[in-house]
Amino acid sequence: MLPGLFKWSYFVHSSDVPEDLLEPCIFSLKMFLRLLEESSEHILRAMGHYLPGQNPAVANYTMTANCRMKIIDALMNPKINRPVEATPFLKKSIEADTKKLAKEGLQAWMVNPGLFEAYGEALMATDLREAKLQLEKALVGAEGPHGIMIENIMITIFKIRVNLVAVFSQLGEDVQKRKSHEEWAVKYLRKNPFIIPEELLRSLLLRKGFPEHPVLTILGGPKWFDKRKTTYKNNERRSKMCRNCGQREPAKTLSVCGGCKYIWYCSKECQVQNWKAHKVSCKEMAAELKKLELLKLADPSAGERSEDWIKWRTSHHGVPIDIAMHALCLHRDPNRGDTHILWYGVKYTPDAGKDVGQKFTIETAGVFKITDVLTEIEKSMNLNKGEGREFIDEILGELKSSKRVEERQSLPYVYMLVCLDGHPDAFLGSGGIDRDYMRRTKYDPDWRKSMKKPPSPVVFRRSKIVDQEHIF
């Protein structure tokens, strides 16, 4: 099985490595890296590592870079936490990138700020001044023209600023700089308490061997983690991203579509590129908003309920991302959102609280094959026969037109929201789950218990429709 370990450790995504295989992966990657660094071109070709006609310099750079980064990811993993051991691999990676990019007239930290962020973080254990230098370089790159185009750059910027606060605090200098980064991080977390992956957030603010992080102290100490609340506002901010390229604020300033008042774009160019896919749903949502305004004039009570419904379902309260991810078992099959649908039965609870997230409660939930419930979709939405499939295809088509879904960086899914008392009208919606976020999040088979009120199974009148959550 040893050859399998070597191949797997090289090709697997770092976030997919289970805890008990981290050490074996580090071992095999270190051995393979030695092979790449010490063997001749003849040996590497004979072993099949260089393909016929492949440029050996390009092949060696790519393979050694991949090996080093996977070793670094494993050593920097909070479960391993050996930053000192990762430092020489980071240094070599930076030297290789600097040499390569210099030929193109580029600075390595401007193109790959994440690498310098990792180097700075690793150096915090041994050399705070050098850590400060590398982190400040990383911040310049992350907030520069190349940086803002990098996937999930806001997580990198957050890590840099939080680590700089810790470094300045330990050094006891650059008070103004420290205060600036501190204020930025505190403001960001108050507005977005759940946007940074939980394990990463705790590893940054509760770092082993360091005193309590100043940012966490300002927030109220370790108890802040348990006191965080999910509100309509912070869920709305969490869901805001450019529909075309996936950029988020504050890396890019987003503007809402003037028609539907729901979809966001980072630029006119992205809006134009996505318009062909968004045009139909935009007009439908704009018409719904116009209808809502007329209803509020004719029947204020019904208008208020419909307004609550629109706000609730368009936030993460409608279908929380984590719930959708676990229910669809996307960890096992990332393509399941193409063939299965989440079905929710909800109840209007206007007196449960002032926040929009409390206005409706999910009472029933289930996962079904889209083909099994097309008739139920048509009945719930008052559609003609055959229109259910058309609606599904239209929704998935719009999602798949975005760069992120096209490149499989975001995993699309569809869901059905049905009010159990028949009002307001049922809603067929969609969403996308960041693939990297899914990799960083452990699968939760008990996702129902994590909801405020564990939902009951969905039961259709046609008893032959079977919940497919655990049927593959």
Image (cartoon, grey):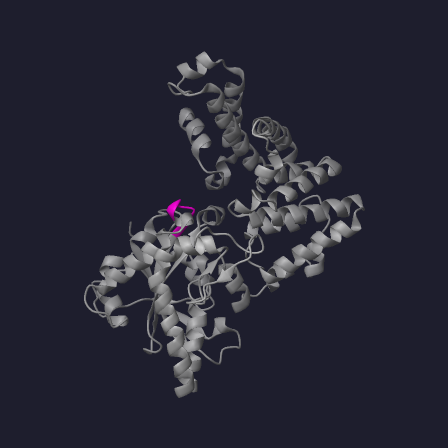
Q: Position of residue 471 (x, y in %)?
A: 29, 52
x, y (%) of residue 383? Answer: 24, 70
Of residue 207 and residue 52, the one placed in the foreground of this image is 52
Query: Is residue 230 toward the left or the right of residue 349 in the image?
Result: right
Question: How far across and down, in percent of the image, does residue 465 sit?
Answer: 23, 62
Indicate the quadrant containing the N terminus: top left, top right, bottom left or bottom right. Answer: top left
At 46% from the left and 23% from the top, the residue drawn is 59
Which residue sits furthest bottom? 298
The magenta segment:
406-411
Tell me if 36 is positioned left or right of 459 in this view.
Answer: right
Image vertical order of residue 456 relative to residue 468, above or below: below
Q: From this viewpoint, is residue 444 visible?
A: no
Q: Does the rendering let one see residue 472? A: yes
Which of the two residues, 190 or 136, is positioned nearer the viewer here?
136
Examine the structure image and report whether residue 410 is included in the region drawn in magenta.
Answer: yes
User: In the image, what residue occupies the spot 47% across and 56% down?
Assistant: 268
- In this rendering, the count of numbered labels is 0
Q: Report the front residue among 120 and 358.
A: 120
Quarter-wise, where is residue 423 in the image?
bottom left
**Image quadrant where residue 417 sits:** bottom left
Horizontal side, residue 263 vs residue 343: left or right: right
The quadrant holding residue 82 is top right
Q: In the image, residue 19 lies at what x, y percent?
A: 50, 40
Residue 454 drawn in magenta: no
Q: Is residue 66 left or right of residue 76?
A: left
Residue farthest right in this picture: 172
The image shows residue 313, relative to residue 225, as above or below, that is below
